[in-house]
Amino acid sequence: MKEIILVTSFGSTVDSARENQIFPVVDAIRKANPSHEVRLAFTSRIVIKRLKDRNIIFQNEIEAMESIVAEGYERIIVQPTHLVGGAEFDKLRKNIMAFKGQGSVQEIVFGRPLLYFMGQEEEVPDDYQILIDRFIKALQVPETEDLLLVGHGGFNVGNASYAVLQLKLQHDGLRNTSIATLENFPTPEDILERWEREGHEPKKVHLHPLLLVCGDHALNDLFGEEEDSLLSELTKAGYEVVQYEKGLGEYAEIQDIYVEHLADAMQGLYQRRL
């Protein structure tokens, strides 16, 4: 059966973000699957348009699928680089599954986002615990200091994934790690209010994006010199801040997890649960 791997990403207009945080994930997948054609599509139409204005061309997921169908592929393995499930993942899956049965396409399988399964049953993995064990613990933040991980967030059910991660951290005894989002609950301000209410005063705060890609917008929100940046708020509150100005896509541990999720999909695992 003629197979192809399609990796999807929201995309970024920032050259360094693509080079350091998106392409390494694709390269890791390509290295792990040398016998397969591996392609990348962006899902943000705005990002694609802005790049096209600079003569940098990327297909969206529909255009990529049209090309794949035209080339006679029979089995398509899709690996999104979403952090969590929810509306964006569901929309992507709907757009791509519409191509099943077109041309020679017999089967389309999906890898899951970074955080999806909670280990709620023996036969499914705990993606949250895997992230904790292989990435968060590897940051080695001292117990007297705090790690503040800040994701994007959103106004859909996928936002609950951040609360799940927080509960998993507490269950694992990592009470010096807090999860916040830029767009929804809990905000960084919610975390600061909780610290003040509990009389919690970490010696240092390690500020790290919980984003696969940390572009200019996120960098400014988190680390900018403006008074309303999170770095400024933390500094104003008297905290010494350790800055990690990098996206998750730069870490080999994260790249490996996406490779493993793709491998599960290639074996046809968990498809009825996505």
Image (cartoon, rainbow, N blue to C red):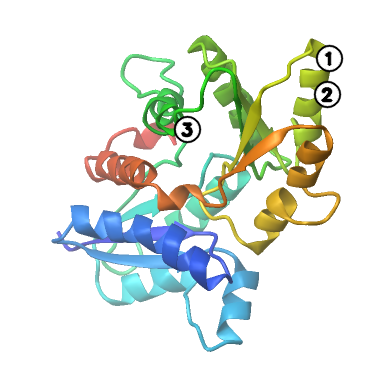
Asked if residue 246 lies left or right of residue 154, the reply is left
Image height check: is 66 above or below 100? below
* Res. 8 image quadrant: bottom left
Residue 263 disc label:
none
* Res. 263 image quadrant: top left
Amino acid at dot 1: Arg
- 113 and 226: which is toward the camera: 226
Amino acid at dot 3: Tyr
Residue 90 image point, x, y percent: 55, 46
Image height check: is 126 above or below 135? above
Label 2 packing within 10 angstroms: few (<14), some (14-19), many (20+): few
Q: Mark 2 = which residue?
A: 193
Image height check: is 46 above or below 206? below
Q: Are marks 1 and 2 in contact (CB under 8 Å)?
A: yes
- 214 and 140: which is toward the camera: 140
Dot 1 or dot 3, earlier in sequence: 3
Q: Are marks 2 and 3 in contact (CB under 8 Å)?
A: no
Asked if residue 238 lies left or right of residue 202, the reply is right
Asked if residue 24 lies left or right of residue 189, the reply is left
Camera sees residue 187: no
Q: Mark 1 = which residue?
A: 197
